[in-house]
Image: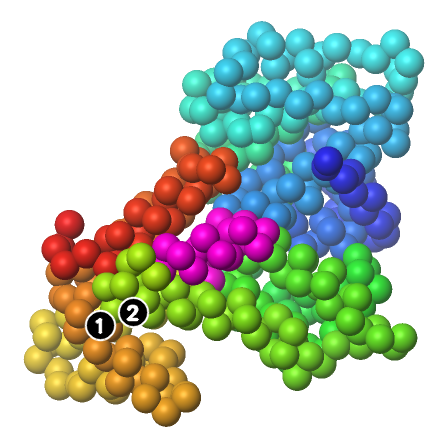
Amino acid sequence: NTRCVDLPDSRGAAAFLSRAPAAMPTLHAFDVLESAPDWERCPFLVIFGDELFLRRQMIDAVRGHAERASGLPASLVDGDAAGWADVMDEVSTRSLFADDSRRFAIVDPADKFVSAHRERLEDQVRLTEAQGCLVLVVGAWASNTRLYKAVDQSALQIDCRLPNRGSGKQIDELRVRDWIVGWAQRRHALAIAPDAALELFETTGHALGMIDQDLAKLSLLGGTERKVDLDTVRRVIGGWRQKTVWDIIDAALDGETAEALSQLDHLLASGEAAIAIFAQISFVLRRYASVADRLARNGRTRQRESIGDALLACGFKDWPKGTLKGAERRLGRLGKGRATILHRWLIETDVALKGTHAAPDRARFALERLFLRLGAATTT
């Protein structure tokens, strides 16, 4: 069952909207979770980004407001199947019981719908006096399109990606850390130390949904003071799960595919979501891919660097002793051909888990295919 979220009403995002109803800014989901905008002032809303947990929180927030304002739920529309007329009927239909409240129609997923009706949507954005609010939930949302710019100037869009530092592509870990600390306090009444929050972020492979689940577990173990420090996170969260994920990766790269699949089965059976498992796996495999890219670049520039030094430069550590030698051996077994396309395999798996293989029974197949590729002796 989906839980509707009641976001706090304060200044911040809401102040932006009240001051400039005709020019609403693009907000990050972190800001919205801390300070809810005035949803009634939103005739057009886009929720975009690849962080599924944040997208779900935003959808629940809109649904929660709709139910509180009118006593009726927001309309949920399947964007893969609905036509333009179907969606517009949901947006324009006025409730018989709550005439002063907006009617919210949530199109999820809306990627296909946007592609089919982009020009109509550009016109719809300008209808600031619309009776209802059209909510589009998309994964990809290119900032160089007319539709993006129109929404950014005269409607509201919420970014559901992990925040980056400035205009770069590196994750702003300090901002994520601060959000985890605040979220733990607001949602779980838990006081987590900043270094413990950062450790939790790294341990889970940057999966916010799993972080929320782990915070719920930690809230049961926080004692009467409900405080969590770094040692607690390492002991409770970073124990068996992190060891199992490393075991899976090591087994797959060592060619022990059957063992890797068996370990995966145990994780899935314990209730871990496939997308969360992949987040942790890809976090490690991206380091292998980075080493391969670094060595290939060194070869082109004729710069000499040992594999061990390249591993250290890309985040590997020789702890426990011998870990670095093991990683070097596995990289050698993977081979130059497969190591240089590892990034592509990870992207393909990520896209599958968020699209064609999003269902739990199909998600297993996407992960198993990745392990078969890692364990195979060929370069395909």
Residue 166 visible somewhere in the drawing: no
Q: Nearer the viewer, residue 36 or 353?
A: 353
Sequence-wise first label, 2 or 1: 2
Residue found at the far bottom of this picture: 321
Location of residue 283 by image quarter: bottom left
Q: Crowdedness of circle 1 by 10 Å Cα count: few (<14), some, many (20+)? A: many
Magenta residues, as a range?
Answer: 260-280
Residue located at (80% from left, 73% from top) = 222
Residue located at (47% from left, 18% from top) = 117
In three-dimensional space, the C-alpha distance between marks 2 and 1, rounded to whole angstroms, equals 7 Å
The number of callouts visible is: 2
Foreground label between 2 and 1: 1
Q: What residue type is labelled 2?
A: Tyr
Q: Circle 1 — which element?
A: helix
Residue holding disc 2:
288
Location of residue 94 by image quarter: top right
> Looking at the image, do the residues carrying marks 2 and 1 touch, with CB atoms under 8 Å apart?
yes
How far across and down, in percent of the image, does residue 266 sit?
Answer: 49, 56
